[in-house]
Image (tube, helix red, strand yellow):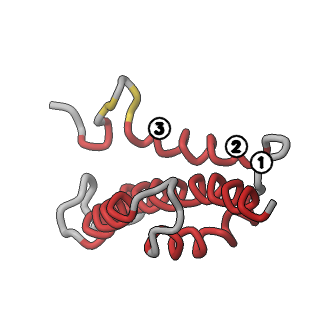
Amino acid sequence: MRKSQDIKVGGVPDRLRTGRSAWGLYRETRRPGAPGLLRRLLAAPRLVGSVLRRDYPGLSRGKLLGFAALALIYLVSPVDAIPDFIPVLGWTDDGAVALWFVSGVVRESGRYVEWESGLRR
């Protein structure tokens, strides 16, 4: 029987995909001409507001709310891949889910910043 933290999707362990996603976000912010990390972080609340008002066409309201709900349910759910009562290890899966959601929003906020700058031209 396979351990729950070794679940593979597309041949890559889940914990490695989360780290790779965060590394990909870092590399994306270092690309010449791309919005930097601070600019993306500052744009994230504007992105969420624009998505909820349906002003931004790059992300649907349902997708944002759906992923936020799934992440929140996993974080508050007593059923985890690694139980929370195990010190440190119990919080790693919750941290990975939070990192996955936040990195997705920050990554999308880069596209949002580019979209916003196109409107101002």
Can residue 33 be seen?
A: yes
Q: Amino acid at mark 2?
A: Glu
Q: Dots 2 and 1: beta carbons under 8 Å?
A: yes
Label number found at residue 16: 3
114 left or right, relative to 83: right
**Residue that carries the numbered disc 2 in the rendered image:** 28
Location of the C terminus (image quadrant): bottom right
Label 2: few (<14), some (14–19) or many (≥20) C-alpha neighbours in 10 Å: some
Q: How many marks?
A: 3
Residue at image position (37%, 55%) is 93
Q: Amino acid at mark 1?
A: Ala
9 left or right, relative to 36: left
**Alpha carbon of mark 1 to alpha carbon of mark 3: how far?**
25 Å
Residue at image position (77%, 48%) is 34
The mark closer to the camera, 2 or 1, is 1
Q: Dots 2 and 3: beta carbons under 8 Å?
A: no
| Helix, strand or loop status at disc 2 | helix
Location of the N terminus (image quadrant): top left
Label 1: few (<14), some (14–19) or many (≥20) C-alpha neighbours in 10 Å: some
95 left or right, relative to 69: right
- Quick one: 91 or 29, which is closer to the camera? 29
Residue 44 x %, y %: 60, 69
**Residue that carries the numbered disc 1 in the rendered image:** 34
- Position of residue 77 relative to residue 32, above or below, is below
Residue at image position (49%, 58%) is 99
**Mark with earlier residue (2, 3):** 3
Residue 67 x %, y %: 35, 59
Label 3: few (<14), some (14–19) or many (≥20) C-alpha neighbours in 10 Å: few
